[in-house]
Every structure is written in C-alpha cells, then in structure tokens.
Amino acid sequence: QVQLVESGGGSVQAGGSLRLSCVASGYAYSVNYRRYSMGWFRQAPGKEREGVAALGSDGRTIYADSVLGRFTISKDNVNTLSLQMNSLKPEETAMYYCAAVSRTPTTLERLLNGDEYNSWGQGTQVTVSS
C-alpha cells in the first residue's frame, strides 16, 4: 500500500499560480518507486473526476488539453510529485487529488483515467476567484 499526502492548495485570483505537492510513502513505494506511475486529478462539486496530468514510470508525461502549456508535472525527488499550475482559471476550482499505481500502462493516455490507479490521497482544495 502506498500513502499519498497532498499539500499546497489554497485560494488565488484568476491568473495566479499554485504549486501542489504529493508525498508518497509506505513500504511498497520505498522498494518499488521506480515502477510507479503517478497522476493528478481534480473534481469540482457536481462534476466528474478529471485527469489533469500524469507522469509515467518511464518518465513520460501527459496533460489534459485544458491545462497544456499552463501546468507542469514533475518529480522533485523520489517521494514528491509536484504540479505547478500557472494562469489559473475560476473553472479550475476543485479538489485536487494525487494518485499512484505500480505499473506503466500500455498507452500513456490511460494515465489520465482514474480507474488505472489504486492509491489515492485525501486531496487539497484549490479555489480560483474571478
């Protein structure tokens, strides 16, 4: 089992920036971290969960079209996944979740599907005001 803890959420005005972090821990992750693919998802009230960005275990990244060019996913270190979010929009107000799975999917696009993951954090709230 992998434990994931997100942080960095908050309230910003439209056009502002936030950097989210997700710290992974647990025995399974510590011994197999190279095998893990990780992603960021968001869910606004009354809306479906949406894949935002993901980092495959092979180092490849993928982004939702809506955030391409504004968000950047990266690994700060072995345990910490980050999401730099620039030029934020009010419609991006949501709870943001980190997720992990110990495999590389056959296609990168699958990493934006939450069903691919078996470990989830509790989320961090992002509120963007107009």
Image (tube, helix red, strand yellow):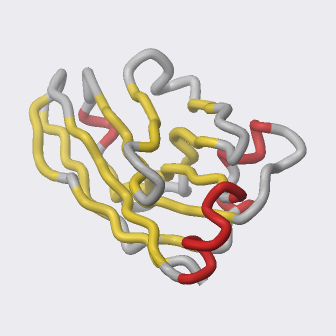
Quarter location, residue 124? bottom left
Q: Is residue 56 above or below residue 100?
A: above
Q: How many marks?
A: 0
Q: In the image, 114: left or right of 43?
A: right
Residue occupying the point 67% across, 43% down = 56
Q: In the image, 112: left or right of 77?
A: right
Q: Residue furthest front?
A: 31
Q: Is residue 34 above or below residue 31?
A: above
Residue occupying the point 65% across, 36% down = 59
Residue 19 vs residue 15, the one in the foreground: 19
Residue 130 vs residue 60, the one in the foreground: 60
Q: In the image, 82: left or right of 118?
A: left
Residue occupying the point 18% across, 21% down = 15
- State the quadrant of the C terminus: top left
Q: Is residue 115 above or below residue 94?
A: below
Can you give x and y, in whole percent of width and height, for residue 41 in the image?
A: 50, 52
Q: Is residue 82 above or below residue 88?
A: below
Quarter location, residue 85? top left
Residue occupying the point 55% across, 77% down = 2
Q: In the image, 4: left or right of 124?
A: right
- State the quadrant of the N terminus: bottom right
Q: Residue furthest right?
A: 106
Residue 66 vs residue 54, the one in the foreground: 54
